[in-house]
Image (tube, rainbow, N blue to C red):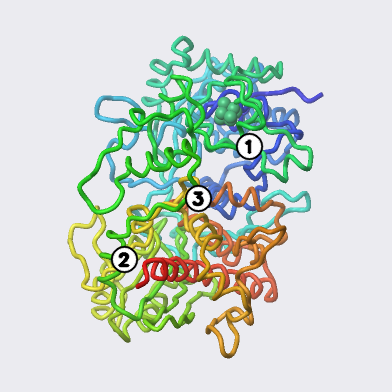
Amino acid sequence: MRPRYLTKSKFKLAIECPTKLYYSDKKEYANQKSEDSFLMALAESGFQVAELARRYYPDGILVESLDNDEAIKLTADLLQRGNVIIFEAAVRYQNLFLRADILIKKGNHLQLIEVKSKSIDGSDKSPFMTKNKGVQSDWKEYIIDVAFQKYVLFNAFPDCEISSYLMLVDKSIECQTEGLNQRFRISKNENGKVKIIVSQEMTKEELSEKILRAFNIDHEINYIFKNEKYDEVRSFTQQISFLAQHYADDIKIYPKLGSVCASCEFKASQEDELSGLKSGFKECWSQVCSFTENDFLKPTILDIWDYRKKDKLIESRKFKMSQVEEEDIEPKSDSKPGFSRTERQWLQVKKVKYDDNEVEIDKEGLETEIKKWIYPLHFIDFETTMVAIPFNKGDRPYQGIAFQFSHHILREDGAVEHASQFINKEIGKNPNLDFIRALKVSLENDNGTIFRFADHENTFLNMILNQIQQSNIFIEDKEQLIDFIKLISKSTGDSKEKWKGNRCMVDLLQLVKRFYYDPLTNGSNSIKKVFPAILSRSLFLKNKYSAPIYGSIKGIRSLNFKDWQWIKTENGKNVDPYDLLPNLFQGIDVSDDQIDFMFNDESLKAGGAASIAYSRMQFSEMNELEREELTQALLRYCELDTLAMVMIVEEWIDMLGK
Ligand code: SF4
């Protein structure tokens, strides 16, 4: 049996929840976090950033072996030298093991550098500590990761002085290399492991203005060593030993339930269980609160929408939503039309407590909103990404890239059409100017109300506006583009200039939150939940979309579908329209459940499924046919997103008899 070493990734997992260590390597437990490193390489720019970091140390030697013992020996041999720079150095101390991204030895001084693709503003003087000296919560997991490594090195090399660094992506630096991101292509080797192909080496000049910057974090690590406490008794270093011992002996640490369980990757889906996989989540909840199979079918307190006192409820041994009382939520009006946040939470709980499955709608509030709308109504959805390594010279890291939009129109007589769309197919190009020009052409022909779902579209329009305003290149239609963006958007909290355009987009998500609650969504306001719920109830939508009229000659105009039928049933239940679309991740070993787990959060949209599919087209080796198939799949997904918005509005209008 291979020794069970506590590695830095295992340690990170155990910091989220120590019980997870027990489930982590066991094939009999479902795990919704994809282990597919190729998918992760596309989702985060980590592999490309690590490869760029190595370019800053041309004398560095890579320890390639994946065999722990061999890698430890190779590292030990290299460390015999007086001075050396090692990539992926392998170090073991007792049952702790690490691979250091970059280890620099100068005499008896070791510099440990952990490379992360997270962005930072390099001009920030004290990015990691709060005013009252604690470590910033956003940075804690990164500091703790390096603290673990420092502890291992400190014990493995007690005679060495060790300094530790986080190397991060400095978003304040302008890139000096044209086409930099295209030089780091993502591929797989024969064992299915990710490898980065560097198509063109960087010159000394290009390396002189670095977009990655190393920050010394010894002070922050000392703070963690001194102040961190676990279960109120163990220090940071005692916690490392505690976790390492339990992991080595394969002993489960007693679960401490909390809000963290809501996103536990060891929840099994129905299909997982049917295929014989166990649910770590169910084991924990049965062990601590004696849940039966029947209890798992009902909503728990983890499902309460946007509720911040879940840990408190668990402490008072309230686990099921039906146990929650009004005083736990304290619903209060916020003096605005519709449901306040707490009123909506209490509504959700009440529906469960009293077994009420009816939709709750604030008719008056919604009618007032509908009266303000101007026809034709426009519905837009953007697909975007933010890449760590910039496309062009002069761009900054993590600059927003808007690569696709879809646009539907709903007319006053009820006619629907998929009116326009945009997708960038060109490799290595920042498409923002083409995108915004195409959007302007799509929307400038009338004065109709424009709908978005969530803040994402407004945030990206603000980003593109900034890019246009700060650009050094000549843009012929600069003023017209700026005016157009300001007309349909509003300033975000961090903009110096404040505006709200005369045709500012209406956020459909806000209308859902304030005026409409469907118990079938179980508290989620994601369009992926609201849309199927509305579809399953609406007679109007059933009548209209059950026939294959979508994309038919006399039916509804579509740019990507032909004679399509949106309402289909299987075993008496509606099939989720998103399940009718082709998989965006063909050829990658990842299940639909894993995709849902990783990307189902609206707030992750900038890094969501479409963004990863786009990274695949931009950064990996694909032939023309594969690229075209993926483009078609992206077009269909985005079209369904705006059609879903149309259908929600159609149902509301029908429901209110407008
Ligand atoms: S269900 Fe909760 S306690 Fe159990 S492993 Fe998951 S997060 Fe930890």
Q: Which residue type carries mark 2?
A: Val
Q: Quadrant of residue 367?
A: bottom left
Q: Residue at the location (36% across, 44% down)?
A: 344
Q: Earlier in the sequence, mark 2 or mark 1?
A: 1
According to the image, label 3 marks what residue?
Answer: 521
Mark drawn on residue 106: none
**Residue drawn 40% across the image and 20% down it:** 222
Q: Quadrant of residue 408?
A: bottom left
Q: Residues within 10 Å of mark 1 (few under 14, many from 20)?
A: many
Query: Does the residue tagged 1 have its C-beta within 8 Å of any atom of ligand 1?
Result: yes
Between 122 and 382, which is closer to the camera in this rendering? 382
| Residue 576, visible in the rendered structure | yes
**Residue 613, x across and y down, in percent:** 59, 62
Q: Which mark is residue 267?
A: 1
For this view, does 6 lie left or right of residue 411? right
Label 2: which residue?
A: 506
Q: What is the x, y in percent for residue 179?
A: 49, 67
* SS for callout 3: helix
Question: In the figure, 214 relative to 190: above or below?
Answer: above
Which of 472 and 518 lies nearest the eye of the viewer? 518
Could you tell me if residue 82 is visible in this image?
A: no
